[in-house]
Amino acid sequence: MNDKKVLLHVCQGTGCISGGADKVFNQLNELLDNSDYNHNVIVKKTGCHGFCQQGPLIVVEPHGFFYTKVKEDDIGEILKSLEPDGNPVKRLFYHEPLTNQPIPKYNDIPFYKLQTREILRHCGDIDPEDIQDYISIGGYKALNKALLQSPENIINEVKRSGLRGLGGAGFPAGRKWELCRNAKGDIKYVICNADEGDPGAFQDRSVMEGNPHSVIEGMIIAGYAVGAQKGFIYVRAEYPLAVLRLKIAIEQAREEGFLGENILDTNFSFDIEIFQGAGAFVCGESTALVRSIEGKRGWPKPMPRAHTTEEGLWNKPTLLNNVKTFANIPLIINNGAKWFSSKGTEKCKGTAVFSLTGKVVNCGLIEVPMGITLRKIIYEIGGGIAGGKKLKAVQTGGPSGGCIPADLLDMPVDFDSLKEAGTIMGSGGMVIMDEDTCMVDVARYFLDFTQRESCGQCIPCRLGTVQMFKILDDITKGKGRKGDIDLLIELSESIMKGSICGLGKTAPNPVLTTIRYFRNEYEAHINDKKCPAKICAM
Amino acid sequence: MEEEILEDILSGYRGNRSEIVPILQEVQDNLGYLPEKAMTEIAEFIGVPESHVYSVASFYAQFRLLPLGRKRIAVCRGTACHIRGAPQILKTIEQKINLKEGETSEDLEYTLETVACIGCCALAPCIRINKDVSGEMTPEKAELLFSENNKEAENE
């Protein structure tokens, strides 16, 4: 290898750290400090590269070599390979699972090659704890650009882009901004919903860990557009690394004059505070989240109620968006609404980020254009089903979503088509299930989750989910009774009609979709006392 | 001792109602749980009834009203973990350390909990011991992990 500077991007995401990436990083620095290794090597800690399953990961730039499952003992060899006459460490390359062929560069690995990484683009190549790194890739340019325009202009740009809220419901972001801007009152708030509570989803965590400034920049622009003075990031306390990196990022943004009084010498002032959620799934719901910041139990407000954009935090107009929605804003301001809306489908623009997990060969974080088919996600990016098994179902949307069967593989993935199929896009969890997964057990699992997480305020949700769980539990234990399926459907309908918030209204989805598509499995449990997937002990 | 720590923590706050959750979090970080006495004092500091502090503390899953073990084991029951065998992992650990989910051992060595999702789904199934996450668990790995942990504890 030649003598030019070589960059080692060492992933320091939560996934890689659990595999020892922090030790790899320390060892790398130690060896470089105490030896005659090539001094043109620069080591950089980065956020999540997305391919967590292969971690700890190191990317060598400019070559693009992608080293997987790196251990401390491998560091010496990697450093040697960077000497002028060195050769890359072939055994650490990613190996194609079917053919066992090594693929040296990450750009050539199907998992990466077929993605459209926009929000995640810089997650693996900037140091999330150094604002200068973010600035060097054009960070805070969008803020500069935004402050030279009128707030109305920015809102129009966001409206034109077609961006829809990426927290799950897909409400048009520009319209929400406009509602908040037009709401009466001098004091307004911006809140970033980073209470990623869906089990099986970690995309928001990865964005915050890998590129926290993109979220902060988006929030500042939102603050300017709606006329707010203060922002909160409501992040789960279960994400300590995301909290730490956001704290560092906010501090650095203040020092650089992007946050605080008179931002970039304009008369716009805005600051951001972190609020750590204390572990309640229901707090992902806007009114519950707001009450939680106010120091109360996270109880959603009953209907009818004013929109959060009118009466939110401390009854002031409040704009609440998801992490990824904010991370898209600098991209839209920099590249224009047209650029953004060129991706995706007619009604769903831009990209979607999914945590691709479960029984799929390549697990990790992916970003794809809206409207891509499930087949492409699972078989091309995901590399198919692990162990050569057969695909049975895809679960999206966490406990509020549902399971769709393998024969819908060619359905485009976006807000509207998923809804039609009975599930929701949600915040981005996508769990792949194979023939060894029991769908009744999955339904039981989700109802166990919701009955634990129900806030207890309204009766349909508090008691209804417990009853549904009990029926499902009985079915999986071979104690199912004739009529249980109808009873589950009846209970579902009452819970959906009677609950006051989204948690209750969507809680039956996993049950209804599994009955809709996998009724035969329920019948086998109830009538024949058999679990076709051999998961339930009958 | 506890009183001093509490006083120290409270001196960093203004006494606003919206500070209840952050105060409870900091107290728990330092004391390991929320003693009744601390909650009474927090109520007085904020100027709300004790019942309000208790209602908040008992609502959120993060808060503990009883002391926890030195090794806090959290088995992830996220969706990806569930379908990749989390129930078996929990069972193995329950048998190995002789505790049920939610229990703390009498010697305060272990607390066994489950959590909704650690967010390491690509490495499912996962467990967390204090702050360290271990991924791609199998019942065998879990068994080994706690055999070693037991040995270490005996040596200490």
Image: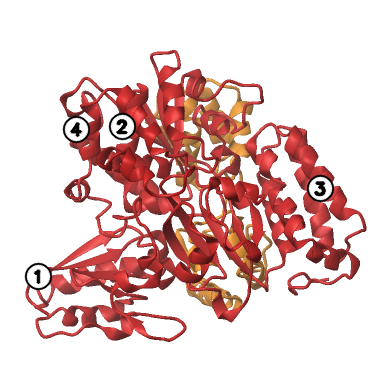
**Circle 2 crowding by C-alpha within 10 Å: few under 14, some 14–19, many from 20:** many
Mark identifier at residue A221:
2
Tell me which chain the residue with mark 4 is part of.
A
Kind of residue indicated by mark 2: Ile
- What is the secondary structure assignment of the residue under circle 4? loop
Query: Marks 4 and 2, how far apart in space?
Result: 14 Å
Earlier sequence position, callout 2 versus callout 3:
2
Q: Which residue is depicted at the point 84% across and 44% down?
A: A490
Q: Callout 3: few (<14), some (14-19), or many (20+) C-alpha neighbours within 10 Å?
A: some
Q: Colour of chain A?
A: red
Q: What element carries label 1?
A: loop
Residue at (45, 36) in percent of width and height: A321
Residue lying at the far right in this picture: please name it.
A482
Residue A2 screen position, x and y as percent = 8, 77
Q: Which amino acid does label 3 sit on?
A: Ile
What residue did someone put label 1 on?
A40
In space, the residues marked 3 and 4 are separated at their CA atoms by: 56 Å
Q: In this view, does A221 lie above or below B136?
A: above
Q: Mark 1, mark 2: which one is toward the viewer?
A: 2
Residue A257: give its label.
Answer: 4
Work out whether A334 lies above or below A397.
above
Element at label 2: helix
Identify residue type, mark 1.
Asn
> Which quadrant of the rendered structure holds the N terminus of chain B?
top left
Q: Which of marks 4 and 2 is in front?
A: 2
**Which tag, 1 or 2, sits closer to the chain's start?**
1
Chain given the colour orange: B
